[in-house]
Image (tube, rainbow, N blue to C red):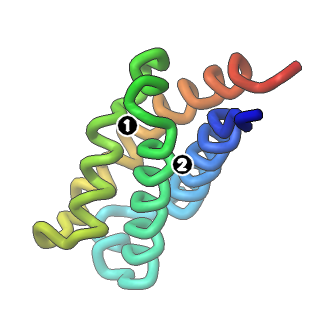
Amino acid sequence: MTLDRKPAHLTDMLGFVCEMRSLMKGVSLADFSKNRVLCLAVEKLFINLGEAAYRLGEEASKTMPGVPWRQITGIRNILAHGYDQVAHEVLFNTIINDLPAVESSLRQMIDVASPK
């Protein structure tokens, strides 16, 4: 018997998104950029988000539109492997501008994927 981990990975992703959005509530880009601990926390949450997305698998992500899967795993790879210097402005803007829609999509997917 194979356990379907999809609901757990989606729930993990939602948790990481909500935590990032909560951490950034009321924080300006200037304040974010100056707060090393907050930057490191957000970087780690992006890594975790990308890892959970990766674990869903390419086939699963194809059946779930509304989430920028490649961008999420791409940010994870950049942060985890240190390909480039981290652009905190990009992370900040992603949290503020993109994660609300991702959160909404994940909530809908969890409703569909979770056993009733």
Give the vertical position of 82 relative to 72 (above or below): below
Residue that extends furthest to the left in the rendered view of this protein? 84
Residue 3: image location, x then y, percent: 73, 37
Quarter holding the C terminus is top right
**SS at circle 2:** helix
Q: Nearer the viewer, residue 13 or 21?
A: 13
Q: Nearer the viewer, residue 14 or 52?
A: 52
Residue 98: image location, x then y, percent: 37, 37
Gap in angstroms between the C-alphas marked 1 and 2: 10 Å
Image point (13%, 72%), residue name: 85
Amino acid type at circle 1 is: Asp
Residue 112: image location, x then y, percent: 70, 17
Apparent side of residue 97 relative to residue 83 in the rendered image (left or right): right
Residue that extends furthest to the front in the rendered view of this protein? 1
In the rendering, which numbered label is found on residue 17? 2
Sequence-wise, the earlier of marks 1 and 2 is 2
Q: Nearer the viewer, residue 21 or 85?
A: 85
Apparent side of residue 69 relative to residue 101 in the rendered image (left or right): left
Amino acid type at circle 2 is: Val
- Crowding at dot 1, Cα within 10 Å, few <14 / some 14-19 / many 20+, comes out as some
Residue that extends furthest to the right in the rendered view of this protein? 116
**SS at circle 1:** helix
Residue annotated with mark 1: 98
Image point (48%, 19%), residue name: 64
Quarter holding the N terminus is top right
